[in-house]
Amino acid sequence: MNFPDNAVMQAIYWLLNTPGVGAVIVLLVGGGATVFFAGLLRWIQLGSKAPELETYSYPTPALLHSHEK
């Protein structure tokens, strides 16, 4: 594999391949993803336990026919 001869790419390569800095970046990305998905699951769980009744934003055929005599 040919590595680009660009100074910016070489600086990024050097920064990411530094063991301490690379580990911090991996921990931040991995930790951020874990916190995000845990929050997403908690949001879904709280939404499933919502105390309000289900409402419809538009009349459905079942609702329209239930009031006929």
Image (tube, helix red, strand yellow):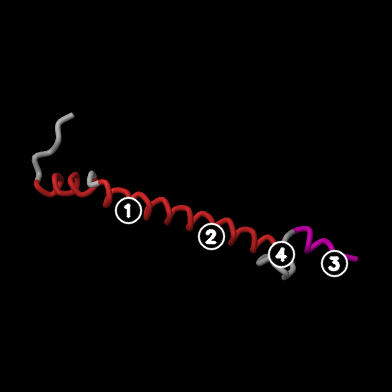
- Residue farthest toward the front in the current orientation of the protein: 20
- In the depicted view, which residue is nearer to us: 67 or 47? 47
Of pointers 3 and 2, the one earlier in the residue sequence: 2
Mark 1 or 4: the one toward you: 1
Can you say whether 27 is above or below 63 in the image?
above
How packed mark 1 is, by other alpha carbons closer than 10 Å (few <14, some 14-19, many 20 or more), is: few
Cα distance between the residues tagged 2 and 4 = 34 Å
Q: Amino acid at mark 1?
A: Val
Q: Amino acid at mark 3?
A: His
Mark 3 or 2: the one toward you: 2
Residue 40 located left or right of residue 58: left
Cα distance between the residues tagged 4 and 3 = 12 Å
* Residue 55 locus on image (x, y percent): 71, 67
Residue located at (18% from left, 29% from top): 1
Q: Residue 40 sits in which quadrant?
A: bottom right
Cα distance between the residues tagged 1 and 4 = 53 Å
Label 2 with label 4: CB-CB less than 8 Å: no
Identify the magenta region.
Answer: 61-69
Report the disc number at residue 24: 1
Cα distance between the residues tagged 1 and 3 = 63 Å
* Residue 35 locus on image (x, y percent): 48, 57
Q: Residue 61 sits in which quadrant?
A: bottom right
Give the residue number, with chain letter if any, for mark 2. 39
Q: Amino acid at mark 4?
A: Pro
Report the disc number at residue 59: 4
Of pointers 4 and 3, the one earlier in the residue sequence: 4
Label 3 residue SS: loop
